[in-house]
Amino acid sequence: MTIKDLAAELDLSITTISRALNGYSDVGERTRQKVEGAAKRLGYRPNRNAQRLVLQRTHNIAWVQSDNELKYLDPHFAEVMAGVLAQAREVNYDIVLTSHGKDREIATYDRYVRDNSVDGFIVDLPREDDQRIGFLLDSGRPFVVHGREPRCDRYGWVDMDNYGNFYRLARLLVANGHRRIAFINGDEAFNYALYRHRAVRHAVADSGLPEDTVTVYNSAHPMGDAGFRLTREALADPAITAIIYSSILLLVEGYEAWAAAAPRHGQPIALATMDDVLRHIDRTRYLPRVTFVRSSLKDAGLALIDELSRQCDRHAAPQGTLIPSYFDVVPGLDPGSIDEPLPPQRRDHIG
């Protein structure tokens, strides 16, 4: 079955068939559905090489990584990739995963733009005023960012509410009487950790408490086994009554240190963490002791491809997608503050 056969079957032009199958907006919805239904029923599959020549499309998406082997061992990255690969398969895209050498980050993006070998880009772990985003905005090529920075109204993005989630976690602990809190965060070179830190500080300040209510401990990216070391450092302060973890990985590593210190610490310690729904971690063993805020990284991976295919296939304007978050508060903590809105001056904060 060729596109010519399909056109004859439907009594439509080859151009109409091609534009319908490739999502062009000048084809009516009834016609599009008719063409897609017939193509599926008759077993038509487009010739990818011919498509590339006629439509100047590759159906490739570039995902450029830093030259850091540890990144590929990071369960957070693996979870996002699972979603990206699953949805790319559904919409007939291939992922070109590559890395750049030292000082070659923008040159790598420029090579893909100049040789037209990909239709769009995934950018992850954004930084403030990220040069990758600036380059892609200037290039006019479709791209989607896993995360946000100040120019997020100009590009497609997928994110969780980092700021809102951690503001609420800190406010929850303060509302339940905690006045010495350790925050074990990720790498603040990246915006997800920077915004989480900012949220915790703002929640404490808005509660009228002094800045030293919170002590922040940072890990490098990827987090690795920093949780045990940083938890032990935090518990060296006998006044600490609560710990917030930026990732369940940090909690899992730190839980052993907490369990060892608990009998001699003299008071119960409240634990709270971000849970990215990493499938290799069974969180049930922590449920009686730990408050979770859950948001799926795999769902984020699916949404990244959905957003990029909107731009590439339908020529749609970029838009942002916020992955839902769900709080699971342990018994013994009053959860009332979770559902309270953020103060007016905090509601529009980029997260």
Image: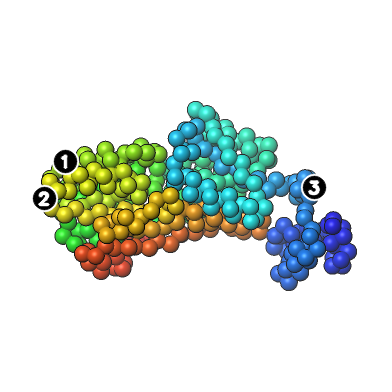
Kindly report which numbered mark, 2 or 1, lies closer to the viewer in this rendering: 2
Residue at the bottom extreme, as displayed: 30
**Comes first in the chain, label 2 or label 3:** 3
Q: Secondary structure at mark 2?
A: loop
Image coordinates of residue 138 in percent, x first then y, are 57, 43
Would residue 174 appear left or right of 225 to someone viewing this image? left
What residue sits right under mark 2 in the picture? 266
Q: Are marks 1 and 3 in contact (CB under 8 Å)?
A: no
Q: Are marks 2 and 3 in contact (CB under 8 Å)?
A: no
Q: Secondary structure at mark 3?
A: helix
Q: Are marks 2 and 1 in contact (CB under 8 Å)?
A: no
Residue at the top extreme, as displayed: 102
Question: Is 273 rendered above or below residue 6?
Answer: above
Q: Residue at x 28, y 56 (%)?
A: 290
Q: Quadrant of the C terminus?
A: bottom left
Question: For this rendering, which residue is in front, 314 or 271?
Answer: 271
What type is the residue that disc 3 sits on? Ala
Residue at the left extreme, as displayed: 266
Q: Residue at x 69, y 62 (%)?
A: 25
Image coordinates of residue 193 in percent, x first then y, are 36, 46
Question: Is 28 rendered above or below residue 286?
Answer: below
What residue sits right under mark 1 in the picture? 236
Specify few, some or many for label 2: CA neighbours under 10 Å numbering under 14, 14-19, or 20 or more: few
Specify few, some or many for label 1: CA neighbours under 10 Å numbering under 14, 14-19, or 20 or more: few
Would residue 39 appear left or right of 290 to someone viewing this image? right
What residue sits right under mark 3 in the picture? 50
Quarter assignment of residue 108: top right
How far is the residue under mark 1 from the one under mark 3?
A: 65 Å
Quarter assignment of residue 41: bottom right
How far is the residue under mark 2 from the one under mark 1?
A: 12 Å
Q: Residue at x 63, y 39 (%)?
A: 113
